[in-house]
């Protein structure tokens, strides 16, 4: 609720194994936010990504079953981004069935870039899936000043390149800093847009 109350439009990613998902998602959409499925994928360090996570060693049938389970948990989303996935998003063969399903459903893929050599966005472009990649990670360090610094960096990148994607988590400090900074964006010449607008901008060249 605290995240949904932030001024938007934001792009909010929901875990498919969360509780009360349709109500949470509908509430976020009513506040003007865009929705993604935060798709659990295997990490290099074997940290548990959650129930029905996509794993590199799964066969195609089980990959499809887990993916479709995640995508059918709630509606109203425009695409997916990866939760964890430092191992999975490096593997073009593993990513292929995911991206094929997204393409069939008309969905976008936001590469969270949990590892620098992710092939997720490149493979999405190759397969014709609308895509974008994270530019800034806001709260790797949850100290408020560090989050403010990352927001400054995101704004600088947006001014330099025309747009930037910043990803953060619903930590108390992140929400607090966003609450203080988002209302002043327009005065600094920055427009807050949903991720689909950045994807569309990339498609338009």
Image (cartoon, rainbow, N blue to C red):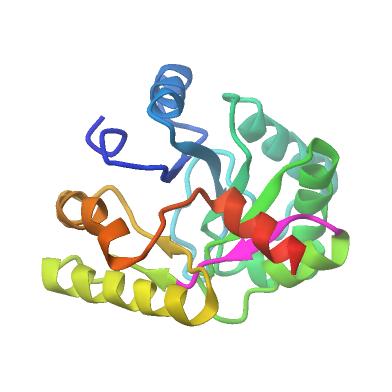
Instruction: Tell me, yes or no, whether the highlighted magenta stretch contains residue 37.
Output: no
Is 190 left or right of 62, judged from the image as shown? left
Across and down, in percent, residue 45 comes to 47, 70
The one of 193 and 62 positioned closer to us in this rendering: 193
What is the quadrant of residue 20 in the picture? top left
Which residue shows up at 86% across the image and 60% down it? 127
Magenta segment, which residues?
128-135
Is 143 left or right of 60, judged from the image as shown? left
Across and down, in percent, residue 76 comes to 59, 27
20 lies above or below 144: above
Is 179 left or right of 36, judged from the image as shown? left
Q: Quadrant of the N terminus?
A: top left
Instruction: Tell me, yes or no, whether the highlighted magenta stretch contains residue 131.
Output: yes
**Dominant SS type (magenta):** loop
Across and down, in percent, residue 176 comes to 14, 51
Q: Does residue 3 appear in this view?
A: yes
25 lies above or below 197: above
Q: Does residue 94 appear in this view?
A: no
Is 185 left or right of 10, judged from the image as shown? left
Which residue shows up at 65% across the image and 26% down it? 72
Q: Quadrant of the C terminus?
A: bottom right
Which residue shows up at 35% across the image and 66% down it? 189
Across and down, in percent, residue 25 comes to 45, 26
Which residue shows up at 69% across the image and 65% down it? 202
Mark count: 0
The one of 122 and 39 positioned closer to us in this rendering: 122
The one of 92 and 14 positioned closer to us in this rendering: 14
The one of 197 and 94 positioned closer to us in this rendering: 197
């Amino acid at each position: 609720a605290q995240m949904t109350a932030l001024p938007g439009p934001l792009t909010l990613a929901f875990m498919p194994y969360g509780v009360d998902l349709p109500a949470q998602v509908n509430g976020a959409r009513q506040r003007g936010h865009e929705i993604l499925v935060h798709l659990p994928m295997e990490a290099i360090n074997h940290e548990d990504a959650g129930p029905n996570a996509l794993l590199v060693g799964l066969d195609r049938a089980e990959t499809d079953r887990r993916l479709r389970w995640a995508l059918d948990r709630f509606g109203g989303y425009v695409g997916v981004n990866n939760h964890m996935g430092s191992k999975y998003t490096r593997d073009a063969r593993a990513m292929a069935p995911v991206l094929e399903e997204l393409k069939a459903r008309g969905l976008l893929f936001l590469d969270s870039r949990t590892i620098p050599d992710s092939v997720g966005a490149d493979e999405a472009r190759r397969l014709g899936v609308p895509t974008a990649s994270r530019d800034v990670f806001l709260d790797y360090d949850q100290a408020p000043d560090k989050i403010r610094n990352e927001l400054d960096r995101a704004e600088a990148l947006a001014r330099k390149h025309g747009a930037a994607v910043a990803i953060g988590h619903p930590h108390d400090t992140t929400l607090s800093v966003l609450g203080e900074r988002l209302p002043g964006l327009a005065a600094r010449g920055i427009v807050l847009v949903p991720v689909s607008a950045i994807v569309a901008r990339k498609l338009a060249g």
